């Protein structure tokens, strides 16, 4: 099982284009289809990982590893998830320093932007789906949407610091859902 965790997160780490949020749905697919956990458990991990310091995909990998295999699982998942980034960033940094002004390189970066945005939107959709906010309309859904709208408005309109929005949203969640 430790080898399976390592290989799974190593492969995910190698395709982590666009950052952690774009990989949430990939990690969810692997964790749930492998039978390591159910979608509700994974949704809870997303919330904790998103509120924790550090990259969300790495945080989730560590949590999945710990959930399935304890400290050893957390360690191998973390190494598997971060090793590709370390190797690829070193290689990309060397290549970028040499070729960053080349037209093909600039075009490739423009081509990757839409897929990164699509992966992030898909992760948000999966979070909504797993939280039941799309198909069930009850008071939990109303509060979910209210917290979302309040956070979005605070960030976009009033430019409130994201840490303050996270803290207030967490406090509202504790008040409402506890």
Image: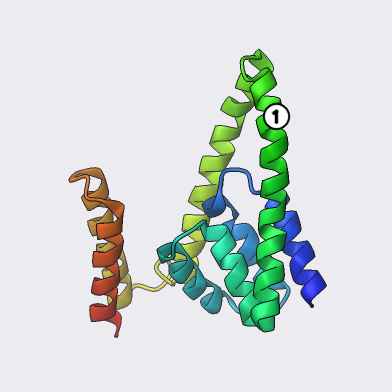
Image quarter of the N terminus: bottom right
Res 26 visible: yes
From the viewer's side, name the closer residue of 146 and 19. Answer: 19
The furthest residue to the bottom: 178
Number of numbered discs: 1
Quarter where residue 2 is shown: bottom right
Q: Quadrant of the C terminus?
A: bottom left
Residue at 26 percent across and 49 percent down: it is 155
Q: Give the x, y percent position of residue 105.
A: 66, 21
Q: In this view, does 174 lie to the left or right of 3?
A: left
Quadrant assignment, res 12: bottom right
Element at label 1? helix
Task: Residue 158 in the image: state x and y as whole percent.
Answer: 18, 46
Is residue 15 something one can see in this rendering?
Answer: no
19 vs 85, left or right, is left
Q: Name the residue under label 1.
A: 94
Q: Which residue is drawn at 48% across and 66% down?
A: 49
Question: What residue sits 43% from the left and 65% below the top?
Answer: 52
Q: Residues within 10 Å of mark 1 (few under 14, many from 20)?
A: few
Horizontal and vertical percent for residue 58? 58, 61
Q: Coloured how?
A: rainbow
Residue at (62, 44) in percent of width and height: 17
Q: Is residue 168 above or below residue 152?
A: below
Q: Quick one: which residue is furthest to the right in this view?
A: 3
Q: Quadrant of residue 90?
A: top right
Q: Please, is residue 51 above or below residue 91 in the view?
A: below
Figure check: 152 above or below 139: above
């Amino acid at each position: 099982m430790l080898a399976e965790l390592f290989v799974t997160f190593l492969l995910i780490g190698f395709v982590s284009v666009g950052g952690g949020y774009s990989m949430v749905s990939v990690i969810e697919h692997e964790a749930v289809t492998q039978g390591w956990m159910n979608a509700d458990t994974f949704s809870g991990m997303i919330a904790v990982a998103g509120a924790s310091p550090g990259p969300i995909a790495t945080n989730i990998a560590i949590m999945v590893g710990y959930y399935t295999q304890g400290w050893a699982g957390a360690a191998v998942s973390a190494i598997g998830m971060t090793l590709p980034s370390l190797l690829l960033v070193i290689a990309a940094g060397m290549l970028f320093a040499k070729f960053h002004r080349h037209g093909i390189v600039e075009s490739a970066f423009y081509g990757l932007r839409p897929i990164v945005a699509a992966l992030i939107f898909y992760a948000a959709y999966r979070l909504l789906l797993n939280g039941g906010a799309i198909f069930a309309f009850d008071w939990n859904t109303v509060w979910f949407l209210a917290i979302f709208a309040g956070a979005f408005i605070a960030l976009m309109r009033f430019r409130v610091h994201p840490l303050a929005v996270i803290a207030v949203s967490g406090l509202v969640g504790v008040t409402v859902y506890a």
